[in-house]
Amino acid sequence: MTTELGGPQLFARFAYPPNALGYCGPEDHRALLEYGSSGVVDGGLVQLARGFEGAWPYLELIAGAAGLDDPLDERVVEAYWLGTALAQSVSLPDLGLHVAERFGPQAGRAWDRLAESLPGGHPSHAFHVFAVYPFVGLLRSGVVDEPLRVLDRCRVRWGRVEALDGATAVVSCRPLVLDRGELRLGDPVAETARFAEDGLGLVADLAAGDVVALHWDWVCDRIDRRQLAALRSTTRHHLDLVNATSRPGVEAG
């Protein structure tokens, strides 16, 4: 057991928000919050991470391409959530095989359209949100408000903390908007996000001015300039990708 912040802890911080909403991973989301708050890493946390059927195969894919034995290596986890350069080490054939095996049966007749998103894609969370989830396809079909909200909340995004109020922070972020049929980032707006609950927090000593990464309605971590650049780059890259292709309609997983 260790209390050093590493890959498993980083995974817990970003995986907790959708897990608490029941969207992915094991049912025991309270345990994930407790791990994210305590800094403890043990076999229980690793087992929880393996229960994320959407994220875990991507971690294995990135680790394998990088020649790393541990899918929860901090570099691998960072590459998945924030889109750092390590995700780009995965070849297009390997990414295509992964998506075909994992999501092909769900896509069915939409597989050809899903395959359009593969060239140029990197196995990051941004790729999964924008290229694999069905919500961009729903936008194209004319259903706008809820798919756009889900895409914006589900993507990992960045912002600057403006103020704190108890266990919540006011964060200035650029929201996702639909502009003449294309997805882009809008002007910054203030949004409220949690960083703790019931005395358990994902980020300690948060302060106004901190640059942070958010997932759903939670502040998950502070990020430095390198991580911020990676997150901006992978977001814009995959927005360009989906704006240039037609959209599939597979189930989120």
Image: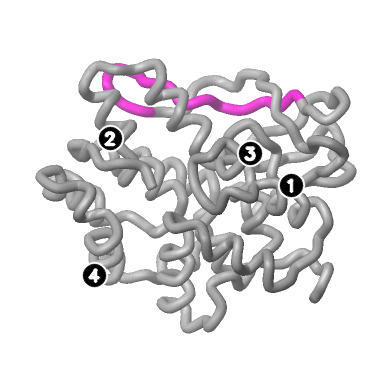
**Inter-mark Cα distance, 2 to 3:** 23 Å
* 36 displayed left or right of 252: right
- Name which of mark 1 and mark 2 comes first in the sequence: 1
As shown in the figure, which amino acid type bears the numbered disc 3?
A: Leu
| Residue 8 in sight here | yes
Local secondary structure at mark 4: helix
Q: Nearer the viewer, mark 3 or mark 1?
A: 3
Local secondary structure at mark 2: helix
The crowding category of the residue bearing disc 3, from other C-alpha atoms within 10 Å (few below 14, some 14 to 19, many at least 20), is many
Q: Which residue is mark 4?
A: 93
Local secondary structure at mark 1: strand
Q: Which residue is mark 3?
A: 214
* 117 displayed left or right of 10: left
As shown in the figure, which amino acid type bears the numbered disc 4?
A: Pro
- Name which of mark 3 and mark 1 comes first in the sequence: 3
Q: Which mark is residue 222?
A: 1
Q: Which mark is residue 243?
A: 2
